Amino acid sequence: MISKCANPECSARFQYLREGRLFRMEIVPDKTAAGSAPISGPKPIRHVEHYWLCGPCSRALTLVLDKGQVVAVPVKIQAAAS
């Protein structure tokens, strides 16, 4: 269950979907331990997790998967073509 904004620096509590942005992330466990060869065996179990960024955070940030972890990163603002 989503309880707060996914931005670790924000303390906004989740109450309604009317503001902010909801993310659905498919998480795939990393099959390798740090510095070791891939682990053999059955395919890793994928699972879906949901994250929410509050309104102010969703205007400046987005969520991405980085090495199996969900992290908040700045939104890339594209310059208007001249």
Image (cartoon, rainbow, N blue to C red):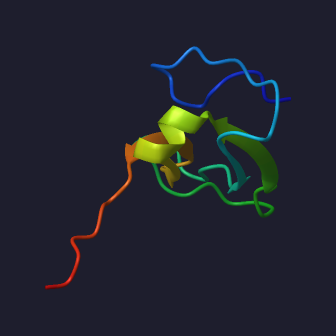
The vertical placement of 17 against 6, above or below, is: below
Horizontal arrangement in the rendering, residue 44 relative to residue 63 (left or right): right
Outermost residue on the left side: it is 82
Asked whether 4 or 46 is in front, the reply is: 4
The vertical placement of 40 against 22, above or below, is: below
Number of marks drawn: 0
Q: Is residue 75 visible?
A: yes
Picture residue at 70% right of the left edge, 18% below the top: 13
Picture residue at 81% right of the left edge, 52% below the top: 47
Outermost residue on the right side: it is 1
Place of residue 32 in the rendered image (x, y in percent of width and height, measured from the top left): 54, 50
The vertical placement of 15 against 32, above or below, is: above
Q: Quadrant of the N terminus?
A: top right
Q: Is residue 61 visible?
A: no
Outermost residue on the bottom side: it is 82
Picture residue at 23% right of the left edge, 76% below the top: 80
Asked whether 62 or 65 is in front, the reply is: 62
Asked whether 7 or 19 is in front, the reply is: 19
Place of residue 53 in the rendered image (x, y in percent of width and height, measured from the top left): 61, 37
Picture residue at 79% right of the left edge, 56% below the top: 46
Asked whether 66 or 41 is in front, the reply is: 66
Horizontal arrangement in the rendering, residue 43 relative to residue 71 (left or right): right
The vertical placement of 12 against 58, above or below, is: above
Outermost residue on the front side: it is 82
Q: Quadrant of the C terminus?
A: bottom left
